[in-house]
Image (cartoon, rainbow, N blue to C red):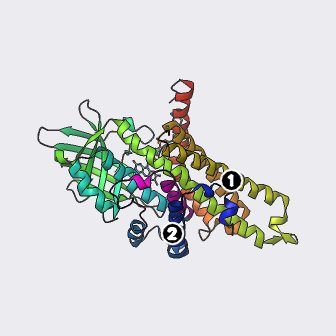
Amino acid sequence: MLTPEEADVWQLEDRLPAEVVALRDRVRAYIDQALRPHLPSWWEAGHLPAFVISDLADLQAFGGEAGTLSRSAGLWQGVLMRELERADSGLRSLVSVHAHLAMEAIARYGTADQIAEWLAPMRRGERLGCFALTDVQSGSDPAAMQTTCRWTGAEWRISGQKRWVTNGTRAAIGVVWAREEPDGPIRGFLLPTDHPGLRREPIGFKGSLRLSDSAVWHLDLRLDEGWRLPGAQGLGAALACLNQARYGIAWGVVGAAMDCVAEAKAYVTQRSAFGRALAATQLVQEAWVGCVARLGLMQLTAFRLAELRDAQALHPLQISLAKRDNVRMALWVARKARELMGAEGISWRHGPMRHLANLETVDTYEGTYAVHTLAIGRQLLGSNAF
Ligand SMILES: Cc1cc2nc3c(=O)[nH]c(=O)nc-3n(C[C@H](O)[C@H](O)[C@H](O)COP(=O)(O)OP(=O)(O)OC[C@H]3O[C@@H](n4cnc5c(N)ncnc54)[C@H](O)[C@@H]3O)c2cc1C
């Protein structure tokens, strides 16, 4: 297998502070011992056992005990996401949606009472969260959402359909976005999942992110004012949370690529064809070194993002660019690693095919490649091409 030092061609790990190194080693050991042997069969079954959620909480994957999300910042959060996605994007998605979307929205936009009631049990993994922005009718263009909320003078009436809600059948609490009728802003609400008028339907037949729970939410319900997140007003409020999650994706996919590079190395060094190891052929070296080179570029980008974030100088455009391009490079690496492993490469028993399938979703959610391209183009060229 590829050693951690070989995967780190730009010697970036040297820059990790001791507490992040300790986190990396703890998460890596947990994943390699407790999860990795089971990933192929869980993926095949399309199910992640519930104990993983409490294990992740024990690893402080949902934030530390300090009562803030500060430990999810910068390098700490990035390295955590990378190590989780070395196993599977579904694992990283669970944490991204729970911690960086749902908990983040409550921390940013909730009242003191909402924060006090929800964040501590969510940090302990006792109550899982989700984030329902995408409508059945609109994904890339959330401003066109048809899920509505209306204030009757006594309560909110919410109706519509949300699709692709990650953690959607397991969650205890959802952050739901709806447009106020007749002409108000998009608003965010907390919705406990046992609330009357919410019907949840699991999405099956997925060829990607099979460890992740995805659901359709049918909403036809009444909510008291106490469930509204008062600061969650306007689409910008939802998008601010997405920036946290996209940061995690830019880091996470580095892990998927690391896993692919390592498995491809193990295969080409052990397998022979035409009287010599595959690793001793020029085309194989060209392909594998191409993977290592891209992995290095992805890591450089991720570390720079962390530096900017910790200096509080990170711009959404930088996150968009890093999400867009790190995912595409990870896809390139996964596809090349799959190819280098021949027929064996198509098996879920190995990482590359599973990562390749997962990364197709990662390329699509939290803003597709096209949407990030157009957002960056609009900003840098000054013309709206959406
Ligand atoms: C497994 C999974 C989990 C998800 N989890 C969540 C979640 O937890 N919460 C949530 O709210 N959402 C979630 N999503 C939804 C995701 O964010 C949307 O799928 C995504 O925003 C794209 O929307 P869409 O699927 O409706 O694609 P569409 O909007 O139908 O777009 C289809 C294609 O058209 C392209 N396109 C759109 N507009 C343009 C344009 N102007 N120019 C050029 N091309 C364009 C897009 O890039 C895309 O390739 C999840 C999706 C998946 C697959």
Compared with residue 305, is residue 291 higher up or lower down, i.e. above or below? below
Q: Which type of secondary structure does the marked residue at label 2 adopt?
A: helix
Three-letter code for the amino acid on which mark 2 is drawn:
Arg
Give the quarter of the figure containing the N terminus.
bottom right
| Left or right, residue 122 beside residue 47 | left
| Left or right, residue 51 beside residue 224 | right
| Left or right, residue 315 beside residue 6 | left
Three-letter code for the amino acid on which mark 1 is drawn:
Trp
Callouts 1 and 2 close, C-beta under 8 Å: no
Residue, disc 1: 10
Q: Which type of secondary structure does the marked residue at label 1 adopt?
A: loop
Seen from this angle, which residue lies furthest left?
Answer: 154
Q: Residue 262 in the image: x percent, y percent?
A: 67, 65
Residue, disc 2: 26
Q: Along the line of sight, which residue is nearer the eye, 69 or 160?
A: 69
The stretch drawn in magenta includes residue 1:
no
* Region in magenta: 59-86
Q: Residue 372 in the image: x percent, y percent?
A: 53, 38
Seen from this angle, which residue lies furthest top?
Answer: 382
